[in-house]
Image (cartoon, grey):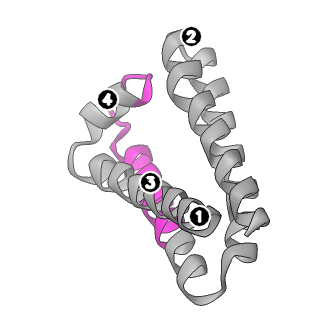
Amino acid sequence: MLIPVAYGLALALDAFVIFIGMRFLLAPRAAAVGYGVAAGDGADAYLAVKALRDTTFGVLGLALLAFVGAQAAAWFMLVVALIPLGDTVIVLRHGGTRATAFGIHFATAVVVLVSAALLFAV
């Protein structure tokens, strides 16, 4: 029972990060608002960087699950949890709401850490 849950959560998180990356690529302004900090003029390059970062991390997570296994994917999730934790701080420092910072970004970090723990337990 633990293996399907661990792999399922990791797959869902990786797929969701790819979705977020694609959203920043295809609808960058709307994605930035959803992130919690609206993008100003001239921010398109930075939004494209975020799109590339998120998409790459999602694909890397899937590759680790498929070709290396749960232990490597667990370490990956543990390290990647730093990103939503940093996003929490970024949103708070740049005028975003506490609800977005903690309700989206911090909560995501917690879920990613749960995923790491489940993968370590497999």
Q: Which is more N-terminal, label 2 or label 4?
A: 4
Residue 47: % across, % down: 39, 45
Question: In whole angstroms, how far apart are the C-alphas of marks 3 and 2?
Answer: 22 Å
Question: In whole angstroms, how far apart are the C-alphas of marks 1 and 4?
Answer: 49 Å
Determine which of the numbered discs, if any, sits on residue 41 in the image.
Answer: 4
Q: Is residue 111 above or below residue 40?
A: below
Q: Which of the two discs, 1 and 3, sits closer to the camera? A: 1
Type of amino acid under label 1: Met
Quadrant where the image shows the N terminus:
bottom right
Q: What residue is pinned by disc 1?
A: 1
Question: In whole angstroms, how far apart are the C-alphas of marks 1 and 2?
Answer: 36 Å
Q: Which is more N-terminal, label 4 or label 3?
A: 3
Residue for point 60% across, 61% down:
6
Give the secondary structure at mark 2.
helix
Type of amino acid under label 3: Val
Question: In whole angstroms, how far apart are the C-alphas of marks 1 and 3?
Answer: 25 Å
Q: What residue is pinned by disc 2?
A: 98
Give the secondary structure at mark 1.
loop
Residue 95: % across, % down: 52, 11
Residue for point 55% across, 59% down:
5
3 displayed left or right of 20 = right
Crowding around mark 3 (Cα neighbors within 10 Å: few <14, some 14 to 19, many 20+) is many
Contact? badges 4 and 2 (CB < 8 Å): no
Q: Which of the two discs, 4 and 2, sits closer to the camera? A: 2
Q: Is residue 29 above or below residue 121?
A: above
The stretch of residues the image draws in magenta is 35-59
Quadrant where the image shows the C terminus:
bottom right
42 displayed left or right of 36 = left
Q: Which of the two discs, 1 and 2, sits closer to the camera? A: 1
Q: Which is more N-terminal, label 2 or label 1?
A: 1
